[in-house]
Image (tube, rainbow, N blue to C red):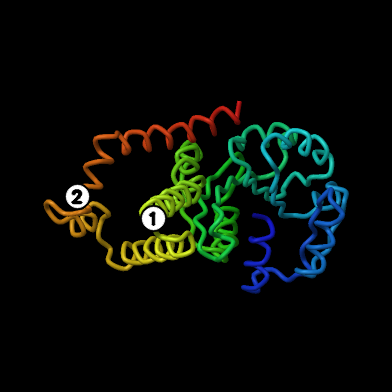
């Protein structure tokens, strides 16, 4: 996520590569960032933490340790953006000793190709300028929405984890095609292009998904047979339950 964001903002000339300092414990990753992006890299988190604007691209289970290590280095008026799932902005604020203006952002992986969706939420001390800067930053890799932080778990369930659900569906489509006699490459090509086209149709038409689904579902036809099979198997309810479990897990990570 950090690399995708940096590529986007540098390509869009929002930030010069010479104005970025990134820290990473892995030497190979630091080499990669320097070679590919031309930015300064450090192994010491406290060096990057002295910047006026900080992005915490840290795994949730590592956040407490990282915050403890940088707390002394962080400027009291720094803008701090976290993209860690499940980690509340209040926790970050407290771990930093009440320093900084905290913004939480929940991006998703399509930002790797400039088609991401990032939800931006205000945390302790965040000002309008901080939120606007975060939105400008993440807009270089897709679209942004602003939400209250209490809705971030729902965003994670729908869009943060959403790409994985989509890929899971495509896996099933491919498996069904193979079971019906297609070779795997053909089944994959059909499934991928179908989903790509359906997504484009949904975006461009402006129609709600239930309307578009109804147009494809001719009475007594093949699509109706498939939809009825999924409904009788409880697929919709199972999906809703699964998505809500993702939100629940996000809440668990924050405890």
* Secondary structure under the numbered disc 1 in the rendered image: helix
x then y, percent, for residue 158? 44, 44
x then y, percent, for residue 228? 21, 42
User: For mark 1, does the 10 Å Cα neighbourhood hold few (<14), some (14 to 19), or many (20 or more) residues?
Assistant: some
Q: Residue at x 81, y 51 (%)?
A: 24
Residue at the spot of label 1:
177
Residue extending farthest to the left is 219
x then y, percent, for residue 58? 70, 44
Residue at the spot of label 2:
224
- Relative side of 99 to 228, left or right: right
Q: Residue at x 49, y 57 (%)?
A: 144
Q: Is residue 242 above or below residue 113?
A: above
Decide which of 69, 206 is in the foreground and name it: 206
- Relative side of 78 to 235, left or right: right
Whole-number angstrom distance, CA of label 2 to CA of label 1: 18 Å
Q: Is residue 20 above or below residue 61?
A: below
Decide which of 179, 235 is in the foreground and name it: 179
In the rendered structure, find residue 74 and report the number of the disc placed on it: none
* Secondary structure under the numbered disc 2 in the rendered image: helix
Q: Is residue 231 above or below residue 116?
A: above
């Amino acid at each position: 996520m950090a690399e995708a964001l940096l590529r986007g903002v540098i390509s869009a000339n929002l930030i010069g590569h010479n104005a970025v300092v990134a820290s990473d414990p892995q030497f190979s990753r630091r080499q990669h960032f320097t070679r590919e992006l031309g930015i300064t890299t450090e192994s010491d988190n406290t060096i990057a933490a002295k910047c006026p604007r900080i992005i915490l691209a840290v795994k949730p289970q590592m956040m407490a340790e990282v915050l403890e290590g940088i707390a002394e280095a962080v400027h009291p008026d720094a803008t701090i953006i976290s993209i860690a799932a499940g980690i509340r902005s209040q926790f970050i604020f407290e771990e930093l000793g009440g320093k900084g203006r905290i913004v939480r952002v929940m991006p998703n992986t399509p930002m790797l190709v400039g088609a991401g969706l990032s939800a931006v939420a205000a945390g302790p001390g965040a000002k309008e300028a901080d939120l606007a800067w975060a939105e400008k930053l993440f807009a270089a890799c897709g679209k942004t929405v602003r939400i209250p932080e209490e809705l971030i778990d729902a965003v994670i369930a729908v869009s943060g984890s959403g790409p994985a659900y989509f890929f899971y569906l495509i896996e099933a489509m491919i498996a069904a095609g193979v079971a019906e006699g297609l070779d795997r490459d053909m089944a994959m090509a059909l499934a991928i292009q179908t989903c790509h086209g359906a997504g484009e149709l949904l975006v461009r038409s402006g129609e709600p998904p239930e309307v578009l689904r109804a147009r494809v579902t001719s009475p007594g036809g093949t699509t109706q047979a498939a939809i009825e099979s999924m409904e009788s198997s409880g697929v919709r309810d199972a999906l809703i339950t699964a998505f809500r479990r993702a939100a629940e897990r996000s809440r668990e990570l924050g405890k």
